[in-house]
Image (cartoon, helix red, strand yellow):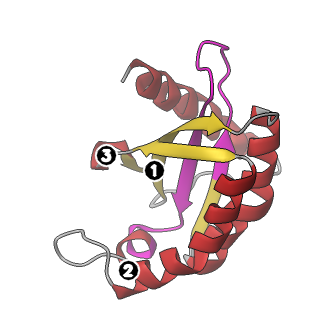
């Protein structure tokens, strides 16, 4: 939980600064979700290897299959978060996020179909680079005002 809090604080400081650069910035109505990822690397694989493959191979598939989504992989600023990363899911609107869930906030058929399309890319990553677990709760979702 301490790592999650540090991650959220880091994101809260860094992402608004992105509005000052030429990169995409946050806009009112964006939904931001933060997931902490703990990686178990395969032998002879570095966290850099894993990160590069995740950004190159997995995140684009998420963006392709979830309209209105932009994904960012974060590495820890401080070294005490060994083998941990974070994913920031940035939806253009709450509706973009919510179209994949039913009234009880469970995955609907759109969400299940998208996850099925991404699964081969995640499976390949796990086979080649390492497995990972994701820590997430609904308390990790934020809407930009």
**Residues rendered magenta in the picture:** 72-96
Side of 108 where 40 appears, left or right: right
In the depicted structure, whether residue 55 falls above or below residue 85:
below
Q: Earlier in the sequence, mark 3 or mark 1?
A: 1
What residue is disc 1 on?
A: 33
The image quarter in which residue 60 lies: bottom right
The image quarter in which residue 75 lies: top right
Q: Which mark is residue 99?
A: 2
Q: Is residue 67 visible?
A: no
Secondary structure of the residue carrying tag 2 is: loop
- Is residue 14 rendered magenta in the image? no
Distance in Å between CA atoms under marks 1 and 2: 15 Å
Distance in Å between CA atoms under marks 2 and 3: 18 Å
- Is residue 91 rendered magenta in the image? yes
What residue is disc 3 on?
A: 137
Position of residue 65 measured from the top left corner of the image (x, y, whole percent): 59, 79
């Amino acid at each position: 939980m301490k790592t999650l809090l540090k991650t959220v604080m880091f994101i809260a400081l860094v992402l608004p600064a992105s509005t000052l650069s030429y990169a995409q910035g946050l806009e009112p109505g964006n939904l931001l979700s933060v997931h902490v990822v703990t990686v178990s690397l395969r032998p002879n694989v570095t966290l850099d290897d894993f990160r590069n493959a995740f950004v190159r191979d997995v995140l684009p598939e998420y963006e392709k299959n979830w309209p209105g989504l932009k994904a960012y992989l974060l590495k820890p600023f401080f070294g005490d978060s060994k083998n941990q990363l974070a994913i920031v899911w940035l939806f253009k609107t709450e509706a973009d996020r919510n179209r994949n869930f039913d009234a009880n906030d469970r995955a609907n058929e759109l969400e299940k179909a998208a996850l099925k399309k991404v699964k081969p890319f995640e499976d390949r990553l796990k086979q080649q680079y390492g497995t990972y677990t994701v820590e997430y709760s609904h308390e990790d979702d934020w809407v930009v005002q």
